[in-house]
Image (cartoon, rainbow, N blue to C red):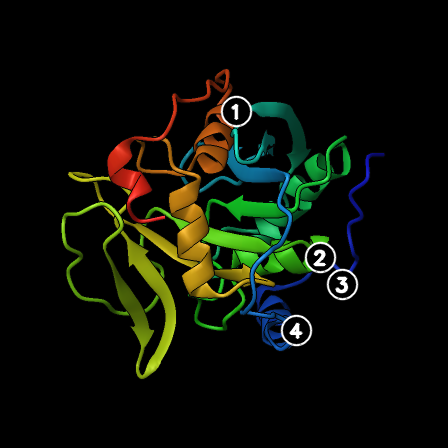
């Protein structure tokens, strides 16, 4: 086992109603403020499910974790695992399908990340405990949620300018930021996972972009989860640097 320790906060094999109650309890433990210090390694985490027939549960999923050095963003480690999936697909409860698989990958790491970016929502969740929050609590590492689509909340249009952002709100509460990481592409949904504030999370997402819509750790983890070889991008473009 590598240096990562996975905390057993609750059973995973539970009914959806009980899972919602677990999220409500864990939400009180989420620390949605601060920022990591002395970051040397940043990890990206993503998961892919095998093709399935309509209405049938996938038999397994591939969890992928990549570790990049910071600030060089050089790929230093990658781990992928395959594990069975037992929890059903329920919107808002994806952590119960995905975190157990990814936890196995994090346990195998040789390099302990100082920051994790997960392809999913964190605080921008109906119970304020999305996938990124859950992962951050289980691993006790600062974690950011960076999702490709909206799960919850409302927002206005985002200007087509790199670094532009608007607030994602649930009523009067700001639960995330909708961030434009590159001109001409759809924005991403950034939220606090654990041990980081949403403004700081957005700043880190921009620091970790290399000309693509997704930050490098998430982009490379996505490729690995789908069976492709992760290929690091070139140096950041000047336009992005202005907003860091």
Task: Identify the residue shown where x is 23% and y is 54%.
Answer: 164
Give the residue at mark 1: 224
Q: What's the mark number on residue 87?
A: none
Residue 47 point in image, percent of width and height: 53, 37
Quarter of the figure with residue 238: top left
Of the image marks 3 and 1, the number of the one nearer the N terminus: 3
Q: What's the mark number on residue 29?
A: 4
Give the residue at mark 2: 140
Q: Nearer the viewer, mark 2 or mark 3?
A: 2
Q: In the displayed image of the protein, which residue is found farthest to the bottom? A: 172
Q: Is residue 217 above or below residue 199?
A: above
Q: Nearer the viewer, mark 3 or mark 4?
A: 4
Task: Tell me if mark 4 has few (under 14), some (14-19) or many (20+) residues whose alpha carbon lies within 10 angstroms of its own.
Answer: some
Task: Identify the residue shown where x is 51% and y is 19%.
Answer: 227
Distance from the alpha carbon under mark 4 to that under mark 1: 31 Å
Distance from the alpha carbon under mark 2 to that under mark 1: 24 Å
Q: Is residue 240 left or right of residue 68?
A: left
Give the residue at mark 3: 9
Q: Is residue 189 left or right of residue 231?
A: left
**CB atoms of marks 4 and 1 within 8 Å:** no
Q: Is residue 94 above or below residue 41?
A: below
Q: Quadrant of the N terminus?
A: top right
Quarter of the figure with residue 102: top right
Of the image marks 2 and 3, the number of the one nearer the N terminus: 3
Distance from the alpha carbon under mark 2 to that under mark 3: 11 Å
């Amino acid at each position: 086992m590598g240096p990562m320790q996975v905390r057993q906060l609750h059973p995973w094999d539970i009914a959806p109603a009980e899972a919602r109650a677990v999220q409500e309890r864990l939400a009180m433990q989420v620390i949605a403020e601060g920022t990591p210090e002395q970051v040397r390694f940043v990890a990206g985490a993503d998961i892919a499910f095998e093709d399935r027939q309509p209405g049938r549960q996938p038999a397994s999923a591939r969890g992928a974790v990549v570790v990049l050095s910071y600030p060089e963003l050089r790929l230093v480690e990658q781990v992928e695992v395959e594990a069975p999936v037992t929890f059903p697909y329920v919107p808002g409860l994806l952590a119960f399908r995905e975190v157990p698989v990814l936890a196995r990958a994090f346990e195998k790491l040789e390099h302990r990340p100082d920051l994790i970016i997960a392809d999913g929502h964190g605080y921008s969740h109906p119970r304020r405990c999305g996938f990124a929050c859950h992962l951050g609590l289980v691993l006790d590492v600062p974690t950011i949620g960076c999702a490709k689509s909206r799960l919850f909340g409302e927002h206005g249009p985002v200007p087509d300018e790199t670094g532009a952002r608007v607030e994602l709100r649930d009523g009067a509460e700001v639960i995330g930021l909708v961030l434009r990481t590159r001109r001409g592409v759809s924005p991403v949904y950034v939220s606090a996972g654990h041990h980081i504030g949403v403004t700081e999370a957005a700043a880190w997402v921009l620091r970790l972009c290399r000309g693509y819509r997704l930050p490098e750790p998430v982009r490379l983890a996505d490729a690995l989860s789908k069976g492709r070889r992760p290929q690091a991008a070139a140096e950041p473009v000047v336009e992005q640097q202005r907003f860091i």
